[in-house]
Amino acid sequence: MGSFAQFHKRSIADRDNFWAEQAKTIDWQTPPQHICDYSNPPFAKWFVGGTTNLCHNAVDRHLKDRGDQAALIFVSTETEQEKTYTYKDLHLEVQRMAAILQSFGVVKGDRVLIYMPMIAEASFAMLACARIGAIHSVVFGGFASHSLATRIEDASPKVIISADAGSRGGKVVAYKPLLDEAISLSSHKPKAVLMVDRHLSEFAKVDGRDFDYAQEREKHLNAQVPCEMVESTHPSYTLYTSGTTGKPKGVQRDTGGYAVALASSIPNIFQGKPGETFFCTSDIGWVVGHSYIIYGPLIGGMATILYEGLPIRPDGGIWWSLVEKYKVSVMFSAPTAIRVLKKQDPALLTKYNLSSLKALFLAGEPLDEPTAKWISEGLGGTPIIDNYWQTETGWPILTICNGVEKAPSKFGSPGKAVYGYDVKLVDDQTGEELTGANQKGVLTIEGPLPPGNLQTVWGDDARFVNTYWKTVPNKMVYSTFDWAVRDEDGYFFILGRTDDVINVAGHRLGTREIEESISSHPNIAEVAVVGVADQLKGQVAMAFAIAKDASALGDATACLKLEGEVMKVVDSQLGAVARPSRVLFVSALPKTRSGKLLRRAIQAVCEKRDPGDLTTMDDPMALKQIQDVLG
Ligand code: ATP
Ligand code: MG
């Protein structure tokens, strides 16, 4: 093991040699001629001249040494299914799916939209696309017709792969009517719709357009579909961002750079080894699911668990029982899921043998200290490793790379800049780099973005340049749109999104800081703080909180009492300037489907504006509650 500082330094100062070495961890048909072509910034081309295939690297190349080893472990607590596919099995299924796609005329470069629940066939579909050079666009199965329609319109898929239904908490959620409606709303029409029929929900078939997966699969049981070797820069997929701050952006990913980035991240970041099991609890509809349910673990020769179900059904021990049963060595989840578990009996955390588990990784939103402490104590010392990244980057920007050099974590910090990322904090007004410790700036990345990051916004190069590279004055750098500080040891702390900063009488405050402070009150489970326009002060902070023990909020006086206590906490920790003008209590907060707080929507409601694009919102009632408590 070397020093991480050296490793990181080399990745920037000796970029091409560093990545040429990393590139050797995947199979190439033709090795790359040119490691990084950055002749047309900010468009970076990685491993130019190389030809390879994602599916080959995820599946075929393992057949020789680990064909009989588990590759995909499908577990559904919704339909009581549990099935392990070896690498050989996966290879067969993916070829069958690829043959079906070819029978519909899908060729390299065509788009295939995947709108599916968390079932094994969804992974066959993704890998089959990669196999034949088609570009997949997975749309989260929880989205309804409007969100789906905008994505169909944008991706213009030749084929859509879907299923009759998903299931959540034992309740069947029919997909087909939503899909039919989405197709009718969209001006683009797919040539074929392939339906996986789980027999959960009856559906109407459109003659000539809709095909049954089981029937088609029968026709191609012995299919042999070779991997189509594509240029490293060939797009592998498009995926939309969560839409927390506005209209979702269609992130376009390459092939070679992505494969190399993931291959290197498995040992260096996640400490995963071939033959071990990776359990990522995300959904294939999100970037974490793309990188760490499907491609990363498989490229790394690991078994991956694809889990359909809630973390608390049949009980809050289900995930840990899977860790024991499948000897999971790497687990990846999100703070929002841990907060759900926090409401369950903590004894469930210690009921199972978790000795195989090296670490639990969390990403997607800020990991608050109480949640981090709760889970790390509950798991009896399993390291909890926060990692910060974006749909755009495809793999972590900030974390602790324990596979390179063991280093301690700090509560509240995702860690240091990952190798390959030339992270700079800059002043948003002047564009000047902030090099001192504990200075607050916008977290930016100096181009070229490392392998695996977005190539562009699908079909809209101008949006890529203007959205990400033109927001910092006097400088062309990639903006993450997140505020951060870096301490004297190089650990970053994310303070919130750049549009979540509020300006109270000239004081610029991060909503995240105020939320952290409020969360430290023992009876606060969760809170959202937004800045609301105020004639006197410019803006004031407003807080919407969920109490851990709602019975303490029996009447208006009790609410006022807790509100007063919360304000005192903020006064003492941050100063009166950060004190919210009101702390109002609700039972749910508006979030995106991926569990991110929709502060922009809350803010709009507070300011009596139109909340805008809400297609990615999880529970519309939560926003209604905000409206109600505002009176
Ligand atoms: P949009 O860009 O469409 O508004 P989004 O930014 O929520 O949506 P994602 O790419 O899913 O879409 O989320 C990335 C963002 O999530 C980051 O920019 C950051 O704000 C937040 N985030 C992710 N991981 C962490 C983490 N470990 N700590 C703090 N924030 C995180
Ligand atoms: Mg974003």
Image: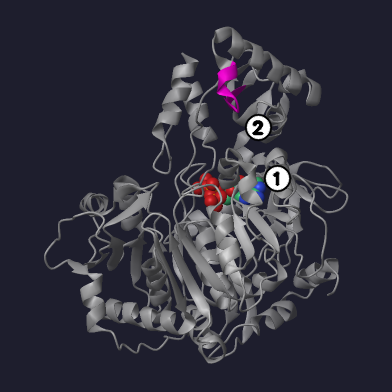
Is the residue marked 1 within 8 Å of ligand 1, measured from its CB?
no
* Residue 609 picture location, percent across and down: 44, 25
In the rendered image of this protein, does residue 14 appear above or below residue 140?
below
Chain part drawn in magenta: 542-552
In the rendered image of this protein, does residue 587 appear above or below residue 120?
above
In the rendered image of this protein, does residue 494 appear above or below residue 51?
above
Residue 372, label in figure: 1
**Which residue shows up at 45% across the image and 30% down it?**
622
Does the rendering let one see residue 105? no
Q: Nearer the viewer, residue 204 or 320?
A: 320
Q: Where, by quadrant of the figure, is residue 128 drawn?
A: bottom left
Query: Badge 1, how many Cα within 10 Å: few under 14, some, many 20+?
Result: many
**Which residue shows up at 52% across the image and 41% down it?**
245
Count the numbered circles shown. Answer: 2
Q: Nearer the viewer, residue 616 or 331?
A: 331
Quadrant for the N terminus, please: bottom right
Label 1 SS: helix
Mark nearer the viewer, 1 or 2: 1
Q: Is residue 478 left or right of 256 when viewed as pictured?
A: right
In the rendered image of this protein, does residue 292 appear above or below residue 589?
below
Evaluate if marks 1 and 2 touch, with contact meaning CB atoms under 8 Å apart: no
Question: In the rendered structure, does residue 545 fall within the stretch colored magenta?
Answer: yes
Coloured how? Answer: one colour
* Residue 577 picture location, percent across and down: 74, 20
* Residue 230 picture location, percent across and down: 46, 83
**Which residue shows up at 48% across the image and 27% down it?**
604
| Residue at mark 2 | 511
Real-space Cα distance between discs 1 and 2?
Answer: 20 Å
Q: Amino acid at mark 2?
A: Thr
